[in-house]
Image (spheres, rainbow, N blue to C red):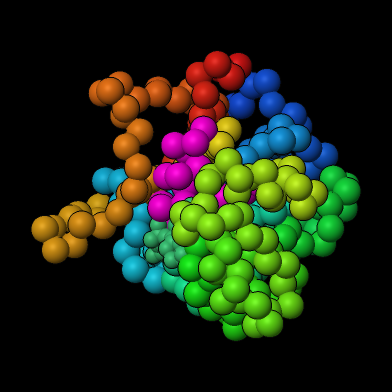
Amino acid sequence: MSASPAPSAGPLSPLETLLPARGQPEYPLSAELSRLYGGPFGLPPDAVYSNFVVSLDGVAVVGASSGSTLSGHNQADRFVMGLLRAAAQAIVIGSATLSASPGQVWSAEQVFPGAAADFKELRRRLGLPEFPTLVVVSGSGALALDHPGMARPAMILTSEAGARRLAGQTRHQVVSLGPAATLDPLQIVTAIRAAGHQVILSEGGPLLLGQLLHAQQVNQLFLTVSPLLAGRTKELTRAGFVEGVDLLGEGVGEHLALLSVHRHQSHLFLRYLAKQSEDP
Ligand SMILES: NC(=O)c1ccc[n+]([C@@H]2O[C@H](COP(=O)([O-])OP(=O)(O)OC[C@H]3O[C@@H](n4cnc5c(N)ncnc54)[C@H](OP(=O)(O)O)[C@@H]3O)[C@@H](O)[C@H]2O)c1
C-alpha cells in the first residue's frame, strides 16, 4: 500500500463494480464514498481483514514504500486503502512494515485526503474514535519508536524480553504475550480484541500476514492487482503478500471465495472470503 503523500492528480473517477459483494453488512456511507467505491461497502462486526497491493506477477515487496511503487501511486488504490482504514478500529502491522514506511501514520485521511471529511463522518456514524489504533507486532521490541506513525496512541505487542527492552522507553501500551520471541497469532488477535478493538485491519507485511493466515485469523482479504510486471531474479527474490508459512499443507491449499471485484482503469480490486464455509 502507498505510504508517501498523494501526488497531485485530477479528481478520482468512481470504481467500476464488476462483481458486487453479497451477504455483507452495508455501512452508512456518504453519497460521495458510495459513488467513488461504486456501491455499498461494509464489514462484519468481528472482521479481521488484510489489504495489500501486488504486481500482476504477484510481487508485494520491492523495498521501502513497496505499495506506492507497485501501485504507481494509484489514486483508486489510495481511496480503497482509505476506506478500509476508515472502517478499522485497529490497524496491525509488523515492525518491518513500520520501518519500511517513512512518514506513514496509517490514517484514512493521509492516504486519500480528498475524502477526509467523508472518512471522518463515516467513523462518526460507526461510533468509532477519530483514528484507528496502530498495533505494532515486534517480538524483539526493537522498533522505531520515533516513527511518525507512533505519534498517536499506539499498542505494541511483544515478548517478555521485548517488554523488558521497551520498559521506560515509550508511553504506548506495551503488551507482553509471553516468553517466546515469536508471538502466537491467535494471541495477537486476542490481545487486540481485549483492548476493545473488534474490526481489525492487517496492513502487513507478508511475514505477519502469513502467520495470521496460517492460524486462520483472517476472515477477508482485499487485494489490489496493479498492472505492473515486476519480475524476479536469483538475487531479487521479491516476496509475495504471504511469506514465511506453508499454506498448502499436504499439497492442497484452501481455495478462497471471491466476494467482490472492482476495477479502475487497469487496476483490479479483489475481495476474498478467507474461509469457504463463509461463501455467501
Ligand atoms: N505490497 C503491499 O501492499 C505491502 C504492505 C505492507 C508491507 N509491504 C512491504 O513489506 C515489507 C515488510 O514486510 P515483512 O513481511 O518483511 O515484515 P513485517 O511482517 O512487516 O514485519 C516482520 C517483523 O514483525 C515482527 N513480527 C511479525 N510477526 C511476528 C510474530 N508472530 N511474533 C513476533 N514478532 C513478529 C518481527 O519483528 P521483530 O524483528 O522486531 O521481532 C518481524 O521481524 C516492507 O518492504 C513493506 O514495504 C508491502
In terms of depth relative to the viewer, which is nearer, 188 or 247? 188
Q: Position of residue 238 (x, y in %)?
A: 26, 57
Q: Where is residue 217 in the image (x, y as percent from the top left)?
A: 56, 37
Query: Total label count?
Result: 0
**Where in the image, quadrant-wise, is ligand 1 located?**
bottom left
Q: Is residue 9 visible?
A: no
Q: Where is residue 21 in the image (x, y as percent from the top left)?
A: 61, 26
From this viewpoint, which residue is outermost toward the front?
179
In terms of depth relative to the viewer, which is nearer, 93 or 230? 93
Q: Position of residue 64 (x, y in %)?
A: 39, 71
Q: Give the range drawn in magenta.
A: 200-216
Which residue is located at x 53 percent, y 46 percent? 184
Residue 191 shown left or right of residue 259 in the figure: right
Residue 227 shown left or right of residue 261 in the figure: left
In terms of depth relative to the viewer, which is nearer, 152 or 141? 141
Residue 13, compared with residue 47, is above or below; it is below
Residue 157 in which image quadrant: bottom right
Which residue is located at x 50 percent, y 62 percent? 139
Residue 100 shown left or right of residue 107 in the figure: left
Residue 150 in which image quadrant: bottom right
